[in-house]
Image (cartoon, grey):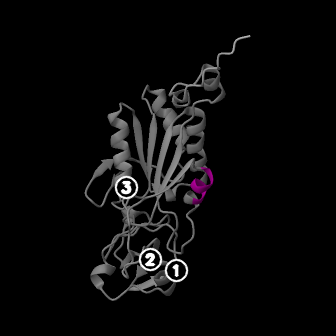
Amino acid sequence: MSTEPTPAADPTDALSAVPAAGSRRARPVTGHLRFYYGPMDCGKSTLALQVDHNQARQGRKGLLLVHLDRSGLPQISSRIGITRAAIEVHAEVDLMGLVRGHWAVGARVDYLIVDEAQFLAPAQVDQLAELADDWQVDVYCFGIATDFRSTLFPGSRRLFELADDLQPVQVDVLCWCGLPARFNARVQDGQVTRAGDTVLVADTGHSRVGTHSEPLSEHRTTTVRYQVLCRRHFRLGDLGTDPGVQGQLSFA
């Protein structure tokens, strides 16, 4: 009987990038559904365009989708000046059908970038999950979690329920008092308002406003804007006293 010791397992085997064939069959390849969220002005649209740039550099082909961009145009626009054309997807658009339409004409779709994802219908989020699970499409969603009443948008709620990864955007946004801000207050005629259409897109000062009942293209002049606040000042409706700070932000 041999008395030689049994060779120790090579610890580097656990680091192998290529699993055994049986392991590969046990773990089917799927796409990922990711949701990057944060308040206004935290850089969500900038990050969306950066992710698209990084994916495209690796030879992957993707689609940029948006609903109700702040510009009123079918594009993803960042406040730092970066803009890319995108496909406008209103609530009735079948995202599965949209992607299949591109496949039908021979176009690859390896990933989707979805900006303003809070405006998605819950059924559209289900379609994104299906694209990730059954068709290996990587989906990157970017949006605001809660509306001006501090209530989850329906699209954001469904993303919180289904996404593989939930990532708060790590750019500090401050309330006028200097504390971290994550609440998006709607300001009309200098006062925080807590009633009205959930979906309303406006810039600062005299603004174009778009709702589901009155599209952005049929704009009117109003004094509606948005301001990020900490929880305390959101509860109190306190916008501070510096008008320069009050007018610095617009809805993402």
The residue most toward the right is: 1
Q: Are marks 1 and 2 in contact (CB under 8 Å)?
A: yes
Residue pictured at 63% horizontal, 30% vertical = 27
The residue most toward the top is: 1
By secondary structure, the bulk of the magenta-drawn segment is best described as helix
Q: Nearer the viewer, residue 188 or 110?
A: 110
Q: Which residue is mark 2?
A: 186
Q: Which residues are magenta?
A: 157-162
Residue pictured at 30% horizontal, 86% vertical = 242
Q: Are marks 2 and 3 in contact (CB under 8 Å)?
A: no
Q: Which residue is mark 3?
A: 45
Q: Secondary structure at mark 1?
A: loop
Nearer-N-terminus badge (2/3)? 3
Q: Which residue is mark 1?
A: 194
Check the image and report above or below for 231 versus 119.
below
Q: Position of residue 87 (x, y in %)?
A: 40, 46
Frontmost of labels 2 and 3 is 3
Frontmost of labels 1 and 3 is 3
